[in-house]
Each structure stands twice: as C-alpha cells, then as structure tokens.
Image (spheres, grey):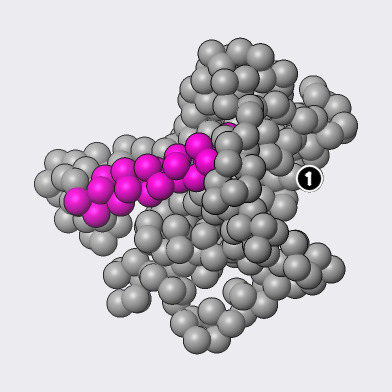
Amino acid sequence: MATYLVSVLNGLAMGALLFAIALGLSLVFGMMDVLNLAHGAVYLVGAYIAVALAADGASPAAFVLAVLLAGVAGAVLGGLLAGLTRATPHHLDQALLTLGVSLVVAETLSAVFGNDVHSIAAPAPVAGSVTVFGETYPVYRLLVIAFGLVLAAGVYVLVERSPLGSLIRATVADRGMVSALGVNTGRVLVGVFAAGAGLAAVGGVLAGPILGAQPGLDEKVLLLALVVVVIGGLGSVRGALLGAVLIGQVQALGTALLPEYASFLIFAAMGLVLLLRPAGLLPARAAVHA
C-alpha cells in the first residue's frame, strides 16, 4: 500500500506538471489550429533558467525569479512563434518550421549549458518531507499538485466563464465577424499563443526539482504533452486536466509496478482512448461539431 500511495501522489504531481505544459499546446492547436512542435523547447528554456538561477535551492527568491523570468521568456518565444506560423497555414509547414526552431533552441542551450544532466534542488523552505497517511512525502511535490489544481480552476474560469474567454472562443469560431466588430483578432491569437508558451516555460522551472534539465528532455516532454492533448481532446481545459492526470498515473504506477512496460502503457492508454473516443475524452465543443 505504501508503494501505491507514493506512486499515486507522484502521478498527481506529474499530472499537474503535464497539465501546465500541455494546456498551451492544446489551446493553440485546438483553438488556433497551429501545430507547435517547439513547445518542448520552450519548456527546456524554463528548465535551464532554473539551472542558471536556482539550481542550489538555497534562495526561494531566486526560484521565484526563475519562474517569473521563464514566464516572460516563454511568452516572448510564443509571440515570435505565433508571428512565424501565421504565414504558414498548413500543418506540415507549421510542423517543419516549429521543429526547426526547436532544434535551434535545443542546440543553443546545449552549447551554453553543456550536455550534462543538471539537477535542481527544491527551494529550501519546501525541501523537506511531511507525513501523508503514515508515509513520508516531499513537500515540494505536494505544492506542485496544489499548483496544478489552482491553475486548472483559474484557466477554466478564464476561458469558459470570463468576457476574455468569450472573446477568445468567438475569435476562434468566426474570426471575420469578430474583426468586423473592431477587435484586433491577431492580438488575441498571439496572446493565447504567448500565454501557452509562458505556461510551458514555467512548467520547466517547476519540474526542475523533479526532472532536472538535460538535452533531449524537450523531446520527451513534447511527446507526453501530445499524448495528453490527444487523450483529453483538442482545445479543452478539462480534457487537458483529465488527460494529464491519467497519463501521470499511468506513468507513475507503471514505473512502480511494471517498469519494463511503463512506456508501452502510456501509448496503450492513448490507443484505448482513441478506440473508444476518437475525439478525446473531453474535447472542446467546436472540436466535437467539427
């Protein structure tokens, strides 16, 4: 039971991180119809910002600064990618363009930080452990789980219940009509792209004490994010959350119980969901109608 409990908590922590990373990918692809394969590279930028500023975990202020700088850097990269992909409406062109950007960013980071595996310590005040149902568990991972819950609630309210969310959804549904009303739809779409990329970079910082930073991690994270998006459904906040939690649990429990089949189980779960629900578990309404 101790193994199961710790694995479930690890799965929730991983799910919270995957949600922060995959949410932007889901919204950009599902709402803007842009395939962004540079999303993992943006995550890696955040991870290396944490390496540069807060690897030793001694200063909580340095970790907070890393989160803020990663959010800004991710948003800037997202804005640039939005501008580049506006001129390439076809998915194949978008994939090739963003893949090229991803390779350039990854190689630049390797040249600056080297090819070693970098570990990142959790901030000192939350580096300890607490007892959860009789088992010790890291405080930092519990905070990551809480962050995921707060993020899910905040983004859901923003996208589904706020005037800004209505504007975003209206822009996606009928860009011409919204533009005729005097709204700069280009800024709306760039804002969504930038926000999604900013979340991915912040996810890189938050995942640092759990996953560290190393070359190639961007590819693994991008693959997991794509699996989450496919399982949850394009453009859906609730779908991204459900998909992230599901994949987090499959990965954590699979690693604990069947380590040799852990990677296979992730794709088996995706195949099963696609077999039963081709559009994903909770696709956005527009995706369902399409």
Q: Position of residue 69 (x, y in %)?
A: 53, 21
Residue 111 against residue 58 in the figure, above or below = below
Image quadrant for the N terminus?
A: bottom right
Residue 8 against residue 119 in the figure, above or below = below
Asked if residue 259 lies in the magenta stretch, the reply is no
In this view, which residue lies farthest toward the left?
181
> Which region is colored magenta?
140-161
Residue 200 against residue 90 in the figure, above or below = above
Give the residue at x 44% y 58%. 241
Q: Position of residue 288 (x, y in %)?
A: 34, 76
Q: Nearer the viewer, residue 5 or 90?
A: 5
Q: Is residue 67 visible?
A: yes
Q: Position of residue 130 (x, y in %)?
A: 58, 37
Neighbourhood count class around disc 1 (C-alpha, 10 Å): few under 14, some 14–19, many 20 upward = some
Give the residue at x 66% y 14%. 58
Query: Does residue 232 appear left or right of residue 191 in this picture?
Result: right
Q: Which residue is mark 1?
A: 216
Image quadrant for the C terminus?
A: bottom left
Give the residue at x 62% y 75%. 269
